[in-house]
Image: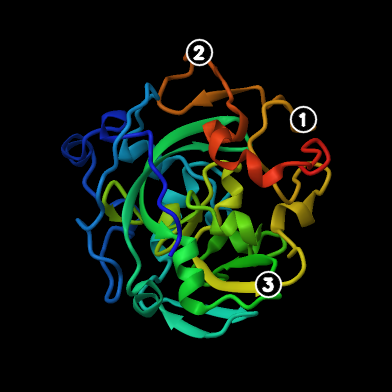
Amino acid sequence: MAGRWKNDLTRADVTPKSLFLNRRQIMTGGGMMLGAGLLAPGLARAQGYSTDETPNSFEEISTYNNYYEFGTGKSDPAENADTLTIDPWTVKVDGLVDKPGDYSLADLTDGMTEEERIYRFRCVEAWSMVIPWRGFELADLLDKVGVQSGAKYVAFETALRPDEMPGVRFPVLDWPYREGLRLDEARHPLTIMATGIYDEPMPKQNGAPIRLVVPWKYGFKSIKSIVRISLVDEMPPTSWNIANPREYGFYSNVNPQVDHPRWSQATERPIGGGIFAKRKETQMFNGYEQDVASLYEGMDLSENF
C-alpha cells in the first residue's frame, strides 16, 4: 500500500457544503447522478491542517473548466458535458502489469481507501483554485493490478466519443487526449485518482467518472475521464507536448522560475477573487516542494520543464 499523505488544507478553506448546495443544486452537467458501480458519497474523510488559501465554491469549480472535448471556452464543458455517458464505464489496464484487462469502474475501485484531499490547483494559464477532491491514491491501484519490473512510466487516455463530445470535431489536439507520469511520480502519495468533489460524485465537466489529480503539476497533467491506463517502459507521448513541445514539457511541474514562452508563471490569478483581485505569487511545485522536490534531484528543471 502507498504511504499516507497529510493534508494541510481543510474544510475551513473551502465553501461549506450546505452553502454551495443552497447556491447551486447539484445538477450541473448531469454528472452528479450516481451510476451503478460508482463510489457512494459520504465515504470520504477530511484531514487536518489549515491554510489561508482563498476558498472556492462548488459552482466556481464546476463552471470554469478546461476540457476541450466539450469546447475551448471555460463555460463550454459545463454547458456541453451532459451528453457524456458515464455508466457503464470501463477502464482498460494493459502493458507491463500482472493483471491486465478491461475493468468496470466498480471492479477497479473495489478495495481502494477513499479520502478527501483538499489540494491547490494551478492551471498553466496562470489561474488557480483550491479544490476538495474525493479519491484514492494511484499507487494503491497500481499495486492492485501488479506493476512488472520493466515498467518506468504510466500512460493515460481520455475517452474519445465524437457523438458525445462535440469538441473533438475540431482538430485542437491529436485526440484522444493523452498524458503520462514517471512511475515514481505516479506512486507518490500526493497523486490520486479522483471520483468526486465536495464529497459528491465527480461532475462530468470536471472529468467524471474518474480522473487523475497531480497537485504539483499544471492542471492539464491531471487527465480527465480516463479509459486506459498503460504501464510502459518508455516515456509516453502526451497531448500538449505533441501539439507544442516548446511550450509544454513532459513534466510540467509548477515552477515560477520557468515562464511559459508566451507569459510569466511567477504569479497567478485565484478564481473567485473578481477581476480586480490581486495576483499572488506562485509557489514552487504549487506549494508541495517539501513533498516532491526529491523526485527531481539532479535534474535541470529549466530543461526538463
Q: Earlier in the sequence, mark 2 or mark 1?
A: 1
Residue at x 33%, y 59% (from the top left corner): 31
> Circle 2 sits in a helix, a strand or a loop, which is it?
loop
Residue kind at label 1, given as amino acid type: Arg
Which residue is tagged 3? 151
Q: Nearer the viewer, mark 3 or mark 2?
A: 3
Which residue is tagged 2? 278
- Asked if 100 appears above or below 242 in the picture, the reply is below
Q: Earlier in the sequence, mark 3 or mark 2?
A: 3
Where residue 164 appears, as percent x and y from the top left, is 49, 68
Q: Is residue 252 left or right of residue 36?
A: right
| Circle 3/circle 2 CB separation < 8 Å | no
- Asked if 69 appears above or below 293 in the picture, the reply is below
Where residue 210 appears, as percent x and y from the top left, is 43, 63
Other-residue count near label 3 (Cα within 10 Å), few / some / many at <14 / 14–19 / ≥20: some
Q: Is residue 203 visible?
A: no
Which of the 4 image quadrants contains residue 229? Answer: bottom right
Residue kind at label 2, given as amino acid type: Lys
Q: Is residue 304 visible?
A: yes
- Asked if 27 appears above or below 260 in the picture, the reply is below
Residue at x 33%, y 28% (from the top left corner): 50
Where residue 116 appears, as percent x and y from the top left, is 32, 49
Count of numbered circles on the image: 3
Which residue is tagged 1? 262
Q: Earlier in the sequence, mark 3 or mark 1?
A: 3
Q: Report the quarter where the C terminus lies.
A: top right
- For the residues labelled 3 and 1, the Cα–Cα distance comes to 35 Å
